[in-house]
Amino acid sequence: MDKHLHELLAGYVDGELSDDERRAFETALVTDPELRRELEEFKKLKEVTGLMTYADLPEEVWENYWQSLYRKLERGFGWIFMSLGAIILLCFGAFSALYEIYTDPGVSLWVKAGLAALIIGAIVLLVSYVRERLFAYNRERYREVNR
Amino acid sequence: MVTKKDTEMMETDISLVMNIKTGNKQALGRLVERHKKLAYQIALGLVGNKDDAYDISQEAFLRVYRSAGTYDENQPFLPWFNRIITNLCRTWLKRRSLYARRMVDVDDNAYLLVDPRNPEQELIRSETVACLCRALLELPFEDREIITLQHFRGMSYDEIASILDIPRGTVMSRLYYARKKLAKLMERNNG
């Protein structure tokens, strides 16, 4: 079937055609049995869906919608500040602990070397993971597809 | 005399987002009041679950608040907002497919109901409703999106073209193919 007729068929069922388009479609309808069958199929579908509606939420849920959203907004800020504070404290704690260990002559060289290897390993793994994620993100074929 | 209601009506979505950009939560509140049901219904049509649609609609408004800075005021608000909702729904569906157990949620088939205001409601059998619900959830995402807007939101082609940011002709052809698939799925589900 002509692609243009597909478009007209949809528009005809929904009453969205101009007078000229409607006349053109009705002319095609006379000579095309497949088009008539599809029209009936679509009308039936439209009839069934027209009798239905989305399940709504109780009225009190709508009344409290904004309050609930506002609470989430506030909590979001709470989480941001808490995370920021935790990161700052952890970094400071880690720096202080490492400083203490590396400036303490009583700590064995083996412990210092082991700790250094542990830190370097963790950094390498972190960088590798971040790089892999970035690589995958840049290569994502459908990243820009919104619809 | 200009009443408070008139002022609210004159306030466009774009001016509200511009106010949200400055951190104005009251502007967000007014935008929420205006579009909360639209957001919920679009999400419901796409994910087919009331609780999740509610959460997604709220998350969409939170994204509006956080991303207001990236909003281009020369573009209409609704297509941008719709993209936020559909992207959230996509992520949610992807996550749901990872946790397949969620697929058997008992609520999934209760997101569509026979309209109680419709005088012909008794003509529709519950099996037909369940069959339609299943068929809709089996439709590809883009098809479900356009069926949601036209059949259940009752939007005109011009409104759909605007919200999806596509030409009117594309709305018509996408509706044609979506309906073909939906009819086929319903026929198959009916056995």
Image (spheres, rainbow, N blue to C red):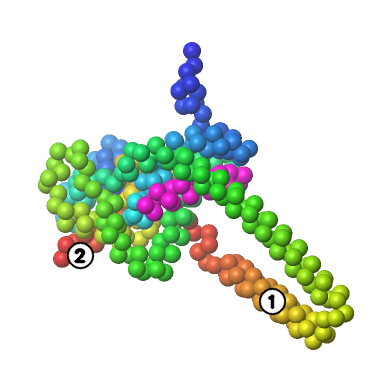
Labels 1, 2: front one: 1
Image quadrant where residue B133 sits: bottom left
Q: Is residue A100 left or right of residue B94?
A: right
The verdict on residue A57 being magenta is: no
In the rendered image, residues at marks 1 and 2 fall on the same chain: no
- Residue at point 35%, 39% (across, down): A60
Residue A35: x and y, percent?
Answer: 20, 53
Q: Can you identify the residue that label 1 sits on?
A: A122
Q: Please state which amino acid type lies under the numbered disc 2.
A: Arg
Secondary-structure class at tag 1:
helix
User: Considering only vertical position in the picture, is B150 above or below B48?
Assistant: above
Which sits in the foreground, B65 or B184? B65
Is residue A27 visible in the rendered structure shown here? no
Q: Nearer the viewer, residue A1 or B57?
A: B57
**Magenta stretch, main secondary structure class:** helix
Given the current orientation, which residue lies at the most extreme bottom position? A110
- Residue B16 on image: x %, y %: 54, 34
Q: Nearer the viewer, residue A51 or A87?
A: A87
Element class at badge 2:
helix
As shown in the figure, which amino acid type bears the numbered disc 1? Answer: Ala
Q: CA distance from mark 1 to mark 2?
A: 54 Å
The magenta-colored residue range is: B51-71
| Residue B56 forms part of the magenta stretch | yes
Q: Kindly identify the residue that appears in the image at 46 percent across and 47 percent down.
A: B58
- Indicate the chain on which mark 1 is placed: A
Q: Sort mark 1 into few (<14), some (14-19) or many (20+) by Cα contacts within 10 Å.
A: few
The percent coordinates of residue A100 (x first, y second) are: 82, 72
Outermost residue, left side: B123
Residue indicated by mark 2:
B188
Q: Residue B97's x, y, as percent? A: 39, 67
Is residue A9 left or right of B75 when viewed as pictured? left
The part of the image, by quadrant, that contains residue B92 is bottom left
